[in-house]
Amino acid sequence: MKKVIRTKDLVSIFLLGAFSLFFYLIGSSFAAESFPEGPEPTEEKIQASRQKTSAAPIKLSLMDVSRLALVNSLDIQIARFDAYMARTSLGEAESIFDTFLNAEGSFSRDKGATASTLLGTDSKSHSYSLGIEKKVPTGTTIEIEAAGTKTRSNSAFSSMNPYTDASLTATITQELGKNFFGLSDRADIKITKLDIENSDFTSLEDIEQALFDVQFAYWMLVRRQEELNIAEEMLDTAEELYNTYKEKYELGLAEETEFLAIEALLYSRRSNLLVAKSNRKTAKNNLLFLLNQGQFHYDVDATEGFGFELEGVNLYQALKGAVENRRDYKRVSNKLKKNAIEIVVKKNALWPQIDLEASFSRNNIALERDKAWENLLEGANDEVSLTLTFSMPLENRKAKSQLKKVNYQKAKLLLELKRTERLVLLEINDKVNEINTFKEQAELYKATVKIQAKKLEQQIKRLRFGRSNVDILIDYEEDLLQARQQLAVKLFDYKVALISLDSITDSLLDKYWQEPL
């Protein structure tokens, strides 16, 4: 028998399902709010999210990024520590003139068997000493030592038992010959100072290179921003052409192939815009990395543009003082100074080793320790000695070889100095020529952009009268794009060449930093 469902039953079923669905949705919402998936966001994350979405772009000029780099750049901080570490070598070299405090204490007991009991079978001794030793720049070593010994023995021959022996000794040793009056010691310190100065030059070069990299990154950001502007403007032009052809196509005034060609151009320009945005973001992130400042989600706007007021560079002005300012030239000059010092030292090394030592000693013996020291200066128990030592290899091949080697090094360094001079002249000549070439190219591309823009404008006007060809229109639009991109590239090359010239003449850092390293 067929069961009939009444209308009343249908209404009840519908209401029951509606209430079930309502409570299900309420429960799901409550569960989602009460038991969120994953960790609860921290206040820092919320703040970072707000900054990411609402923070205004950071506006920076070339001066701003240069000063930030000198303070924050990790590469610059690393270069500074290289210089600081090199400077510690001066203390190591001067340590030869440190003052040494020497102290010694000892105890001995002898109960060894002897051939005669008269010599004693038990003896004890306590000894101690305190002294100061110092070498001075004249190659003179001065030693002063006070020593005391207390001896106790059961020997029948000991007239004083126990007794204390107090002594005071002064010794002066003067080096002659190879290290004639400390010539070699002082030479080592002078050479170390020159090495430290060369290390400073190297660190300054690293700092200047880091500054160059930051300015390069800044101009790259300007270039990428210009390319983004070009991509946006070209996209606007492509959209206008697309809308125009779309209307003509819908009215039957344009072929489908023409409409499809313009549509493909539109998609190509949209793709170019995506690439330009990505390139600008990469350039911005690279600048933030070099500055060691800010988070990568921050945006940066360069307040300076390329501009079109380009100036040439005078070769004479660029060469003026460039050779003397170059740090590589100064390094070679310092190496020549070191070599001159080494030649003097190596000539002295041909001499024999001669040391003159003079010693004066006074001692006093007493039963009591205090008496031994009190009467030390009153007695006349003196000992004076004078010693002259002489040592020299008969062939002396090592010293002769070393002298010949440093003379060869002098000839080599003179050639390096001359080569550095010519290298500076070559680099500056080439860089000045490059700058002036980029300037002329930029001016030509500037004129080309005007021509291509006017050409495209005239072709668009022809389109309104139905006298334009879509292929020609696309070619003209592409010609304008290429001209504008090439202009941006040449302006970028011009700016980079200018800072490169400052870097070649080692004057880039001086424009932004006058502090000592």
Image: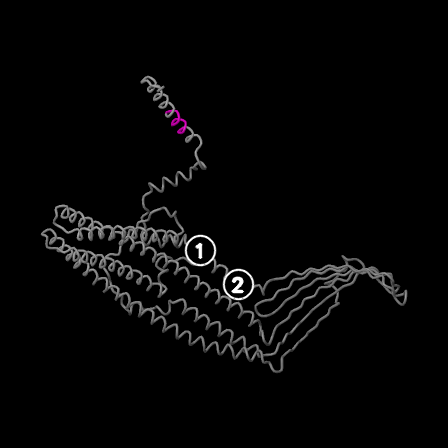
In the image, residue 189 sits, relative to residue 479, either above or below, namely below
Depth check: give the residue in front, 294 or 13: 13
Is 205 included in the stretch rendered in magenta? no
**Disc 1: which residue:** 77
Question: Callout 2, which amino acid?
Answer: Ser
Q: Quadrant of residue 47?
A: top left
Highlighted range, magenta: 22-29
**What percent of the width, then of the height, locates residue 212?**
36, 59
Taking the view exactly as shown, the residue that stands out farthest to the right is 117
Residue at 29% across / 54% down in the picture? 224
Pointer 1 or 2: first along the chain: 1
Q: Amino acid at mark 1?
A: Gln
- Quarter occupied by the N terminus: top left
160, 446: nearer the viewer? 446
What element does badge 2 sit on? helix
- Please tell me how many numbered marks the rendered image carries: 2
Q: Secondary structure at mark 1?
A: helix
Q: Which label number is shown at residue 99?
A: none
Taking the image as shown, residue 256 lies to the left or right of residue 490, namely: left
Which residue is rendered at x = 66% and y = 72% of the image? 357
- Please identify, in this view, whether the residue under mark 1 or under mark 2 is nearer the observer: 1
Task: In this rendered view, identify the residue nearer to me: 454 or 459.
Answer: 459
Looking at this view, name the residue that lies furthest to the front.
1
> For mark 2, what is the residue?
89
